Structure formats: structure tokens, C-alpha cells
Amino acid sequence: MNTLANDLRALVQQRLIAKTRIEPSGCWVWTGVRTRARPTSHEYGVLGIRIGVGKMHTSAPHRWSYLLFVGDIPHKYQVDHLCKNTLCCNPAHLEAVTALENLRRSRVWEVNRSKTHCPAGHPYGKPVLRTAKGRVNVPARDCPRCGLVRKWIKRNPGKTAADYVPRAERTHCKHGHEMTDANTIIGMASDGYLKRSCRECVNVRAREYQRLLRASGKKKR
């Protein structure tokens, strides 16, 4: 809900006054129903308003307070707590901002920016702008090593991250051929990085390709 109808204003004001406690800091702390997304996340209030037997309008108390005392909330904007108290409903402590700006002001943003390694201990790569359905576009740091591990596990069902060995450290190819200097081909991958290929496997594929050509009666292009 981004606008507050006239028939809701009196009910919202009555419920806010009955369910808030004014602290010495100036915060109007919500004392009603509370919820949190995860056990370690901040608590947020929940306020539902119903007119007669009509539809129940449910939102956070600080959003109700902003609509009542400040004005409309722009589309896709969030109401940020300037006092950092997520249960505060004081309109003087609230500001409508974009989702990205709200994230930048959070403690999570500062904590994640200070990290230099992923949970597995690999150094992070450069931040990239990630676009995901239903989420804001924010610079995200992905671990290149963990990304390779996830792709490898997907291609090798039944394997785990503990079974993964970096390509540069492998002594044998996936078919068991030893990766000696004579049996190794260094080439350029599609992503611009150098890659090692097993010469024996390349020869096997080439011979199979020639066999299929002869069987079909076609000539090599």
C-alpha cells in the first residue's frame, strides 16, 4: 500500500497511539505484534487494519506512520529508519529511499564490504552488477573458485566440493590419462583464459569424428 485512504486514517492513528511507547531517545517504539525474517535478523512490527467486514490491510507500523504523517511512499521505495531502530514509528525518524540506498545504509553492507575472502577462504573477485528477478541491482562479489566448483558439481552428480581439484593441479584427465607434458595441449578457452586439454582424448574424439564421416558417406568440410 503506497497511499492511505481517508477512511483508514482515523483507524491507523488510533492503533498507532495505542500500540506505541515513546522512549527518551524520541523513538515511538511499537509494542504490538512483531516478526523477524530470520532468528538473527531485526524485529519489525506488524499492523493490520480492517474496515468493517472488508479487506484486511496489513503493513509495517513505520510505513503506516509515514503514510499518515508524511505522505505517499513512491513506487518501489522503502521506508528507512534514520535512528536504526526497526520498531520505531516516529515520522521524524523515517525517510523514503530506494532499495539500493536502504541497503547501503545498513550494517550488512559495511560488514560485507570489509570481507576479502569468501566463506571457503578463496579471495573475492572484482564486484559485478548482478541482476536477478525480484531483487535490486547491486554490486555483488562472487568467488570465481566457488563458481567453478558449483558448475563442476552440477556436471558430476554425486560429487562434492571436497572432490574438486583445480584444472591446473590435475595430474590425470577425467578419462584417466596422465597429463604429462607430451600428453598436454595448451589452448585458449572461450572466456579468454588458457586451458589444458588431454592430447589422447583429443585424438580419440578426432578418430571418432572421422569414423562417423566415413559411415555417413560425407566428406570433411
Image: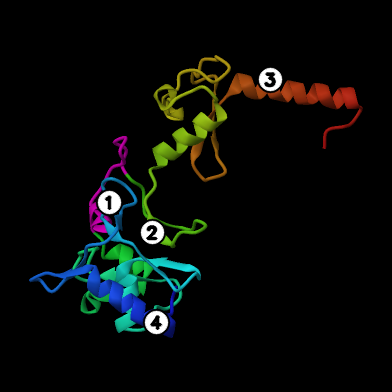
Residue at (46, 73) in percent of width and height: 52
Camera sees residue 4: no
Residue at (41, 37) in percent of width and height: 146
Up-down relation of residue 144 to residue 196 (above or below): below
Q: Earlier in the sequence, mark 1 or mark 2?
A: 1
- Between the C-alphas of marks 3 and 2, the distance is 44 Å
Residue 26: % across, % down: 13, 74
- Which residue is disc 2 drawn over? 139
Q: Are marks 1 and 2 in contact (CB under 8 Å)?
A: no
- Determine crowd level at label 1: few under 14, some 14-19, many 20+ residues with C-alpha closer than 10 A: few
Disc number for residue 72: 4
Q: Nearer the viewer, mark 4 or mark 3?
A: 4
Stretch in magenta: 107-123
Residue 206: % across, % down: 72, 25
Of residues 46 and 141, which is closer to you in this image? 46
Q: Is residue 145 left or right of residue 16?
A: right
Q: Earlier in the sequence, mark 1 or mark 4?
A: 1
- Which residue is disc 3 drawn over? 204
Residue at (41, 25) in percent of width and height: 169
- Which residue is disc 1 drawn over? 41
Q: Amino acid at mark 1?
A: Ser
Q: Nearer the viewer, mark 3 or mark 2?
A: 2
Q: Are marks 1 and 3 in contact (CB under 8 Å)?
A: no
Q: Is residue 149 left or right of residue 173?
A: left
In which quadrant of the rendered view does residue 35 lie?
Answer: bottom left
